[in-house]
Image (spheres, rainbow, N blue to C red):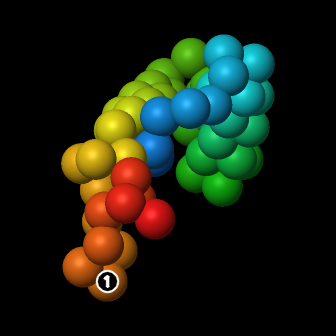
Amino acid sequence: MPIVTIQMLEGRSDDQKRALVEQVTAAVSETTQAPKERISVIIDEMKPTNFGVAGVRQSDQ
């Protein structure tokens, strides 16, 4: 049973997240031959204040 975790900054709409889950599930099913019913997708959203690149928080850009 594949479990996919996607970490991203918050701010996407429900429609965007729904499409992401559908398309990731389809891709994993196609590449691993796992049935879609056995694939779980977890979206872990974080605030821009909790994520930084090159020493700069996203919220400070």
Q: Viewed as shown, does residue 28 lie left or right of 58?
A: right
How far across and down, in percent of the image, does residue 14 sit?
Answer: 66, 16
Which residue is labeled 1 in the image?
54
Q: Nearer the viewer, residue 33 or 3?
A: 3
The structure residue drawn at horizontal position 24% and vertical position 48%, both measured from the top left corner, is: 50
The structure residue drawn at horizontal position 63% and vertical position 31%, both measured from the top left corner, is: 12
Q: Farthest residue toward the bottom? A: 54
Q: Quadrant of residue 13?
A: top right
Residue type, numbered disc 1: Ala
How far across and down, in percent of the image, does residue 41 sit?
Answer: 47, 30
How far across and down, in percent of the image, does residue 8 sit?
Answer: 45, 46
Q: Secondary structure at mark 1?
A: loop
The structure residue drawn at horizontal position 30% and vertical position 73%, both measured from the top left corner, is: 56
Q: Is residue 57 above or below residue 15?
A: below
How far across and down, in percent of the image, does residue 48 sit?
Answer: 37, 47
Q: Nearer the viewer, residue 51 or 5?
A: 51
Q: Residues within 10 Å of mark 1 (few under 14, many from 20)?
A: few
Residue 29 shows up from this direction: no
Q: Is residue 33 above or below residue 60?
A: above
Residue 11 shows up from this direction: yes
Q: Farthest residue toward the front? A: 60
Q: How many marks?
A: 1
Q: Nearer the viewer, residue 16 or 42?
A: 16
Q: Is residue 14 above or below residue 47?
A: above
Question: Which quadrant: the N terminus?
Answer: top left
Q: Is residue 57 above or below residue 29?
A: below
Q: Viewed as shown, does residue 54 lie left or right of 4?
A: left
Q: Quadrant of residue 16?
A: top right
